[in-house]
């Protein structure tokens, strides 16, 4: 097996694990980043979390366009975590931080805005029950593409610019 085949196998294993665990291994579309930033209207006092983002495209975009907002992302894959740490180091962006670990074990109450591109079943069963305990009246949960089934939040759908809707859930 040569190096290229090995890298392809590793990426395949990571993508299968990611898909089975929580989310498709598909990034947010580039042309939706500006729209997402306009929807979020992040305040400098807010703390934003992107959960298991693999390439941190959303976090990088938001950090560059909201330099006074704290941007955090958590990554489960050691491969993407290391790559993201290197990207942050060389980007010079100071308002971002990456955490390695399982997002479901994180205290989500410290965040004002949480963004996911996850399958609805996982969010409905594993994330929303944790979020229902949050007391922050300004808290927002943003789902890219997928509508969530929930009893906790008011839903607002932002119509697709081309293909995908963005859903916002508030207390």
Image (spheres, grey):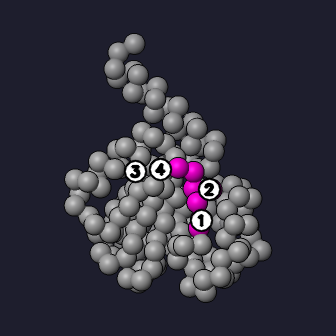
Quick check: marks 2 and 1 in contact, CB under 8 Å? no
| Element type where label 4 sits in the image | strand
Q: Residue at x 32, y 78 (%)?
A: 68
Dividing the image into 4 quarters, which one contains the C terminus?
Answer: bottom right
Which residue, given by chain and number where applicable, does mark 3 sit on?
55
Circle nearer the N terminus (3, 2): 3
Looking at the image, residue 129 sits to the left or right of residue 8; the answer is right
Residue 168 screen position, x and y as percent: 58, 75
Q: Nearer the viewer, mark 4 or mark 3?
A: 4
Disc 1 packing (10 Å; few <14; some 14–19; many ≥20): few
Disc 4 packing (10 Å; few <14; some 14–19; many ≥20): some
User: Magenta span covers which residues?
Assistant: 101-108
| Element type where label 3 sits in the image | loop
For residue 90, above or below residue 61: above
**Mark 2 → mark 1, Cα distance in angstroms:** 7 Å
**Mark 3 → mark 2, Cα distance in angstroms:** 21 Å
Residue 3 screen position, x and y as percent: 34, 20
| Element type where label 2 sits in the image | helix
Which residue, given by chain and number where applicable, does mark 4 sit on?
100
> In terms of image quadrants, where is residue 123?
bottom right
For residue 119, above or below residue 37: above
Disc 2 packing (10 Å; few <14; some 14–19; many ≥20): few
Q: Residue at x 23, y 57 (%)?
A: 91
* Front one among 118 and 99: 99
> In terms of image quadrants, where is residue 28?
bottom left
**Mark 1 → mark 4, Cα distance in angstroms:** 14 Å
Queried whether the magenta region covers residue 105, the answer comes back as yes
Which residue, given by chain and number where applicable, does mark 2 sit on?
105
Circle nearer the N terminus (3, 1): 3
**Mark 3 → mark 1, Cα distance in angstroms:** 22 Å
Q: Residue furthest top?
A: 1
């Amino acid at each position: 097996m040569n190096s290229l085949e090995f890298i392809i196998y590793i990426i395949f294993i990571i993508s299968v694990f990611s898909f089975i665990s929580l989310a498709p291994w598909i990034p947010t579309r580039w042309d939706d980043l500006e729209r997402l930033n306009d929807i979020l209207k992040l305040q400098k006092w807010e703390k934003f979390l992107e959960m298991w983002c693999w390439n941190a495209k959303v976090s990088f975009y938001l950090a560059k366009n909201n330099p006074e907002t704290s941007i955090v992302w958590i990554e489960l894959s050691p491969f993407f975590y290391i790559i993201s740490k290197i990207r942050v180091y060389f980007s010079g962006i100071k308002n971002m931080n990456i955490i390695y670990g399982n997002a479901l074990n994180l205290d989500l109450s410290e965040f004002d805005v949480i963004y996911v591109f996850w399958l609805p079943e996982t969010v409905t069963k594993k994330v929303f029950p944790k979020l229902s305990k949050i007391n922050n009246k300004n808290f927002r949960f943003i789902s890219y593409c997928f509508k969530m089934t929930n009893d906790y939040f008011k839903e607002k759908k932002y119509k697709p610019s081309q293909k995908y809707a963005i859903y916002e859930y508030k207390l």
